[in-house]
Image: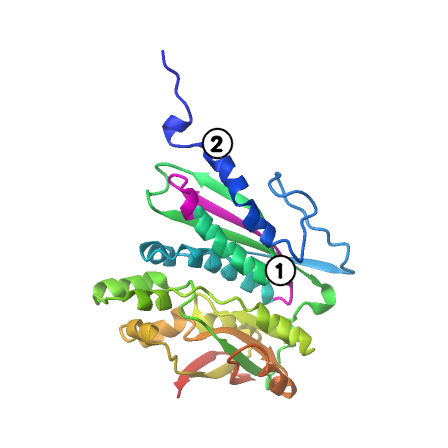
Amino acid sequence: MAKHTYKQSGVDIHEAAAFVDDIGAMVKRTQKKRKLANAFGLFAAGYDLSKFKEPMIFTGCDGVGTKLELLLKYDLLENAGKDLVAMNVNDVLTTGADPILFLDYVGVNQINKRQLARIIAGMCEYLESCNCILAGGETAEMPGAVLDGMVELSGFAIGAAEKRDVLNPGEIKAGDVLVGWPSAGFHANGFSLVRRVIEKENIKLTKKEAAQLLAPTLLYHDVTWGLKKAKVKPAAMAHITGGGLWENLGRIFVKRGLGCHLKVPVWKNAVVQKVLKHVDEADAWKTFNMGIGWVAIVDAKLVKKVLKVGTGAVVLGEMDKSGAVTCELVN
């Protein structure tokens, strides 16, 4: 009587193990400035914090959401890897910490080495740029649980900082200034709404428009590093993701009775506007970043310094005692 094998059930453990070896060169790219304390590919990854005097660690977990369906449709898999890194690393950066380790979870119906390698290549490109190590992860082959042709993605970032460098949103006060930096697009939020608009309004995208609409989430390490170099310590920083400016800023200070009125520049992105014109305005503010991907709240005396950091910095408004976040578009 013939015996059943794991491979017959749709899972090839040898293919999965071989894939880990295949991506070795890409993984090494993320260990130029920082090194793991042990070898890559073991059961757990370690990082030596002994150079820190009073280390604090920070963690974040996020995914790419339904944007992934469009990235697969338009064959922009590298962008999926970049989005995954940025959505996690940016959250860690808001604390004042530097990202040191990144882990990924990839779930597939069946292992496709070329497809997975492209996603990981995108991850490694972004991780290399911010000196963060791809420390490991999990590639799960799950026939039946994951639809054929689909990919599940989750990321996990770990950052570290000296205790003295950690930001304290409790220091925010009325009169502080909110400075914003532009986004590259919708980033990786609100794509269930984007997809609905495209479908219901029968919007046709050229290849160039699709690439612009699906541009990867920007990494804002250049901003945080630039602020440190300029010796500017914000009271707080925010990564503008799901919930938009209204929710992502509000969570920092509204419960303390503080608020702000933001004057946001009109988003000069033709393909984004092609979608936004079909979206309820109030819902757009509460769903999308509206062209602003990063915000720092700083003392008014530091604004001139801050505006020189990164690319495209703009003053959005001042902190007040309104207890609410309100926004308006300005030309």
Query: Would residue 62 be seen by someone viewing this image from the given angle?
Result: no
Q: Is residue 59 above or below residue 284?
A: above
Q: Is residue 324 above or below residue 136?
A: below
Residue corresponding to mark 1: 131
Secondary element under disc 1, as helix, strand or loop, is loop
Looking at the image, residue 167 sits to the left or right of residue 20; the answer is right
Residue at x-position 39% and y-position 47% = 151
Q: Quadrant of the C terminus?
A: bottom left
Instruction: Pick out the residue farthest to the front.
Output: 25
Q: Badge 1: how crowded within 10 Å, few (<14), some, or many (20+)?
A: many
Q: Quadrant of residue 127?
A: bottom right
Q: Which residues are magenta?
A: 95-115
The dot on residue 14 is 2
Q: Earlier in the sequence, mark 2 or mark 1?
A: 2
Residue at x-position 58% and y-position 73% = 223
Amino acid at circle 1:
Asn
Residue at x-position 48% and y-position 59% = 82
